[in-house]
Image (tube, rainbow, N blue to C red):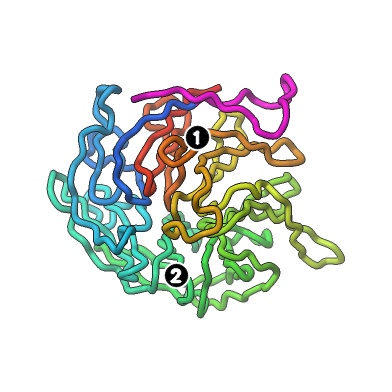
Amino acid sequence: MKTTLLLTGLFGLTVAGSEPKAVRFSRYFVAAESYESVGVLDANKDGRPDLLSGDFWYENGPDPKTRFRKRHLIGNQKRFDQYYDDFSTIPMDVNGDGHMDVVTGGWFGQMLRWLENPGKDGEWKNHDIAKVGNVETTRSWDVDGDGVIEIVPNNPGHPLKYFKHEKGGTFRQVNVAPTQDHGLGFGDVNGDGRGDFIVSKGWLEAPADREKGPWPLHNEFELGTASVPILVVDVNGDRRNDLIVGQGHGYGLHWYEQTTEGGKRGWKKHIIDEKASQYHVMEWADIDGDKKPELITGKRFRAHNDNDPGANDDVGLYYFTWDGKKFVQHTISYGPAGEGKGTGIFFQLVDLRGTGRLDIIVAGKDGLEVFFNEGS
């Protein structure tokens, strides 16, 4: 079933010509599976982007009416109560055979691992990378600036480290800090051209030699059960990177303005939204075609299986535009579970149809769906 959604701003009337028209999305149901992560990759090398979530990859066939309907079983992800132990889907040709594999990790098994694409139908072999501690989720960033991504798991209560990909399908662990909490971000905080790590209780300054360290911790804020990622972006155009932080297991979405007074760095907290809870995952990209990035996020559906504040509230998926003074919320999908669509723990923004517009692919305990971007 395919429906068209027209988005409107929630904070007052829009003055004609003051900002781009709201984006229209076509909602497309893919599967009722309850995996919380989805990746996009060309699984069969036919030149079209496919979806991979949990135990299946979903084929992007030539017929728009049956797009992603054909699924291919790749394995049997372990299930623990209401969770699959699969909390990220990072596409990567790990073994250099020309086929895109995926990197994932799990909270319960505490293992970072990769799944090998065999290049044909059948099981994707599981390869353990390292036992790293409980994996909240995993992200990929170019930590050392060499043009190649590193794999960075968020392991609350365990040491912060990243994994450098090496030839032959191996990974080498690089230690950063003795501990980390819920939430993780990466970006240049102090303007020295090197990416720093942001954790819940401060930011870790990148040394010239990332592998030798040390990474000094600056205890300049307390972010709580912060989102993954914590975004490091220049919100207000003052050439200083700010932070955008959601509360992954409570109410609140905020941005922290980086300030300087008397040569000392400070952080001024601003509200984006405090009416929704479980802002666990977010992205920063141009979703409306105005050549400026927007904030795309939503409420993770049943993050802690109904044990978080606001767990039984309606779910939603949103994008936020910046009008020069504040963020303006636009609703992509909202309503009770089954009508509105929440997020999982890892979603994707990819142009699936070659339109030049970013589509939103979102998994979760409330199913796997695509929101095709139809423009404004």
Residue sitting at 62 percent across and 23 percent down?
21
Query: Circle 1 sits on which residue?
Result: 333
Give residue 139's quadrant in the image. bottom left
Say the numbered circle drawn on residue 119: none
User: Vertical placement of 249 versus 181: above or below?
Assistant: above
Question: Residue 209 at x, y = what percent?
Answer: 53, 72
- In the image, is residue 23 part of the stretch drawn in magenta? yes
Label 1 residue SS: strand
Q: Where the N terminus falls, by quadrant? A: top left
Q: Nearer the viewer, mark 1 or mark 2?
A: 1
Give residue 65's quadrant in the image. top left
Residue lying farthest to the top in this orientation: 16
Give whichever of 152, 74 is nearer the camera. Answer: 74
Q: Which residues are magenta?
A: 1-24
Separation of disc 1 and disc 2 at Cα?
31 Å
Q: Is residue 83 left or right of residue 268?
A: left
Q: Is residue 321 left or right of residue 108?
A: right
Question: Residue 308 at x, y = what percent?
Answer: 51, 59
Residue type, mark 1 in image: Ser
Residue sitting at 40 percent across and 62 percent down?
151
- In the image, is residue 158 part of the stretch drawn in magenta? no
Label 2 residue SS: loop
Question: Residue 63 at x, y = what percent?
Answer: 25, 22
Which of marks 2 and 1 precedes in the sequence? 2
Residue sitting at 45 percent across and 54 percent down?
147
Question: Residue 237 at x, y = what percent?
Answer: 73, 44
Q: Residues within 10 Å of mark 1 (few under 14, many from 20)?
A: many
User: Vertical placement of 276 versus 158: above or below?
Assistant: above
Magenta region, main secondary structure: loop
Residue type, mark 2 in image: Asn
Query: Circle 2 sits on which residue?
Result: 155
Q: Answer yes or no: is residue 150 visible.
A: no
